Image (cartoon, helix red, strand yellow):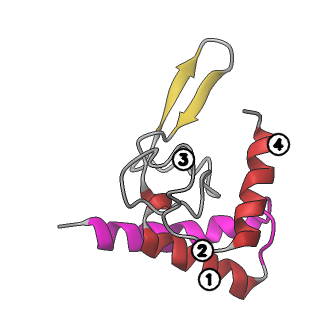
Amino acid sequence: MGLDIIKSRVNREIEKGWIGPDRSCEYYPCHYDGMDCTFCYCPFFPCKDPRYGRYVENPKLGPVWDCSDCLMIHHTAVCKHVIARMREMGITQCTDPRIGGLFDEAAEIYERESSP
């Protein structure tokens, strides 16, 4: 899937707002039962935070960011916060540079909510 298609999809997800688990999706659950499906694709990609991913070597592309094991953007508290902050800030496009500023807030919520 091309990056332009992913960006278009994230823009539609931002427009829709929080949806929670989407059991009507043919891919649900792609990670775990009860996951939040507000963002199918992460608006922070590539975050480049080693807690959530790493660079892997792709024979055709060279080093690419792999965050396939990251579940942060599928955590309900994170999704609700990110969508609320985007609305508050007037963010409607995934290319808005202010999205990057929300990453630390999202990571803090995820770390706090998912730690034992």
The answer to which of marks 1 and 3 sits earlier in the sequence is 3
Tell me the kind of residue under disc 1.
Ala
Amino acid type, residue under disc 3 in the picture = Lys
Residue 107 x %, y %:
44, 66
Three-letter amino acid code at disc 2?
Trp
Q: Nearer the viewer, residue 62 or 67?
A: 67
Q: Which residue is mark 3?
A: 48
Task: Identify the residue at image location x=40%, y=74%.
Answer: 109
First in residue order: circle 2 vs circle 1: 2
Mark identifier at residue 18: 2
Q: Is residue 8 left or right of residue 56?
A: right
The quarter of the rendered structure image containing the C terminus is bottom left
Which region is colored magenta? 91-114
* Distance CA(mark 2)–CA(mark 4): 22 Å
Q: Is residue 32 above or below residue 34?
A: above
Q: Secondary structure at mark 1?
A: helix
| Location of the N terminus (image quadrant) | top right
Total labels drawn:
4
Q: Residue at x 54, y 47 (%)?
A: 48
- Residue 106 x, y percent position in the rendering: 49, 70
Disc 2, disc 1: CB below 8 Å?
Answer: yes
